[in-house]
Image (spheres, rainbow, N blue to C red):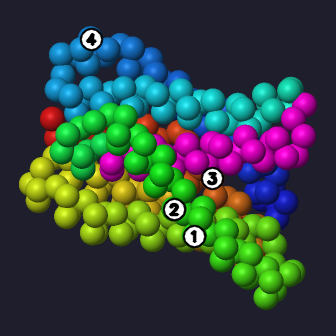
Amino acid sequence: MTVETWHSFYQGELQGLYAKLVIPLAFLVFWVWTRSRHKTELADDRFIATYCLIFAFETILDPIATGPLGKFAGLGENASTAVMLLFVLLGDLRVFWLVTYLTDPDRDLMASLRRAALWMWIVPIASWPLYQALLAWRPELPAQTLWILYEAAFVAVALVLRQRFVPSHLDPDSHGRHFLRTALAYVAVYYSLWLTADLLIIVGGLDMGWALRVVPNQLYYAIWVPFVYASWYARR
């Protein structure tokens, strides 16, 4: 492969659109096939099943809305950025909602969602002022610096939740604790891979970073929902 090939492959529709849709669409078929199972399950199981259904649709909508649909609608740069940021926040919300719901002793669906909606601002609020401070110091820094800071911050948040927050709220042998620690480790992995790839691209000037970026894209878009579903029901 030439140096340009990885970048062009990453920017193409095969990677940017179609590869992100196959597994979520297959999962929806599986979910419908097993839907009768979800009617008689315990509350936590029903939450996970419903959560996976909601975010399977969100996963499918994300690359479509930020790709061909946005182009078809003729969205300008500002509107396209706003749509992209909305889906970034939703992608973070889905992580925090698992944590806030399963660590809530009352299992209050809407209260846990409200807490998750507040938590999803932690990383943006931490990253943006630091990015502005770095720009004041080094104005020539590329815009991708913001995402490098964002990715590093989310790795830190995921690990703190995994190592500190979840163990302090759930019993050592509980299913929810094992599940959340597994899910948060998964999140830390895909954000770490994004961070490594972006450092290779921006700092190292290596086009192979675009090839590496394909891996966390698949973990984040295509595999997250099936992973959550399989991890939860594996111990059931």
Look at label 2 and name its amino acid: Ile
Farthest bottom residue in view:
137
Write the start and end of the magenta stretch as one range: 74-100
- Tell me the distance, in whole angstroms, between the alpha carbons under discs 4 and 2: 38 Å
Residue 157 left/right relative to 2: left
Q: Is residue 59 above or below residue 173?
A: above
Q: Is residue 212 above or below residue 63?
A: below
- Who is closer to the viewer here, 202 or 97? 97
Look at label 1 and name its amino acid: Ala
Instruction: State the SS at label 3.
Output: helix
- Tell me the distance, in whole angstroms, between the alpha carbons under discs 3 and 1: 26 Å
Identify the residue under disc 2. 122
Residue 85 left/right relative to 92: right
Look at label 4 and name its amino acid: Ser
- Label 4 Cα crowd, 10 Å radius (few <14 / some 14-19 / many 20+): few
Give the number of the disc on residue 214: 3
Q: Is residue 37 visible?
A: yes
Rendered image quadrant of residue 73: top right
Q: Earlier in the sequence, mark 4 or mark 3?
A: 4
Count of numbered marks: 4
Please tell me which residue is depicted at 36% across the width and 26% down the height of the picture.
50
Please tell me which residue is depicted at 60% across the width and 61% down the height of the picture.
124
Give the number of the disc on residue 126: 1
Q: Are marks 4 and 2 in contact (CB under 8 Å)?
A: no
Q: Earlier in the sequence, mark 1 or mark 4?
A: 4
Instruction: State the SS at label 2.
Output: helix
Question: What secondary structure characterizes most of the magenta part?
Answer: helix
Residue 10 left/right relative to 42: right
Look at label 3 and name its amino acid: Val
Name the mark nearer the viewer: 1 or 4: 1
